[in-house]
Amino acid sequence: PDRRLCAGPARLCEALGVKLVLNGVSLQRGPLRIVRGPARRPALARGPRIGISEATDWPLRFYYRDSPWVSAAR
């Protein structure tokens, strides 16, 4: 379902067609780039990562608060 397309990094990569060959490639200079878009101030949240067995307490999970597209655990 569309709601699950962006529920986690693996699903997001699958939805965008990002292949493992791009692992470690610069997102500023590589073939896939993240660029600054229009100014927008969504409510961002940060928390521990989910669905992994190591470093689960590291606050490296970033998401839009109250987004229906974020995986369930918050």
Image (cartoon, rainbow, N blue to C red):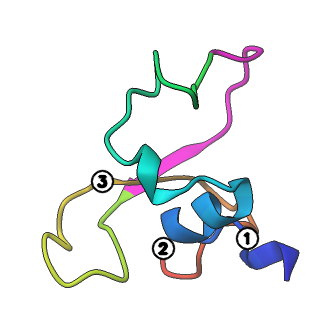
Give the residue number, with chain letter if any, for mark 2. 74
Residue appearing at x 67%, y 27% in the figure:
41
Query: Residue 74: x percent and y percent?
Result: 48, 73
Residue 40 is a magenta residue:
yes
Q: Is residue 23 left or right of residue 28?
A: left
Which amino acid, by three-letter code, is at mark 1?
A: Leu
What secondary structure is found at the residue carrying circle 2? loop
From the viewer's side, name the closer residue of 18 and 64: 18
Query: Residue 20: x percent and y percent?
Result: 44, 58
Residue 10 is a magenta residue:
no
Give the residue number, with chain letter if any, for mark 1. 5
Contact between marks 3 and 1 (CB within 8 A): the answer is: no
Of the numbered discs 1 and 2, the one sitting upstream in the chain is 1
Quadrant in which the N terminus appears = bottom right
Q: Point out the stretch of residues depicted in magenta.
A: 36-46
Which amino acid, by three-letter code, is at mark 3?
A: Leu
Of the numbered discs 3 and 1, the one sitting upstream in the chain is 1
Contact between marks 3 and 2 (CB within 8 A): the answer is: no
Q: Is residue 66 above or below residue 7?
A: above
- Quarter residue 58 falls in: bottom left
**CA distance for labels 3 and 1:** 20 Å
| Rendered image: mark on residue 60 | 3
Residue appearing at x 76%, y 68% in the figure:
68
Of the numbered discs 3 and 2, the one sitting upstream in the chain is 3
- Quarter residue 61 falls in: bottom left
Query: Residue 21: x percent and y percent?
Result: 43, 51
Q: Is residue 8 left or right of residue 2?
A: left
Query: Residue 49: x percent and y percent?
Result: 32, 68
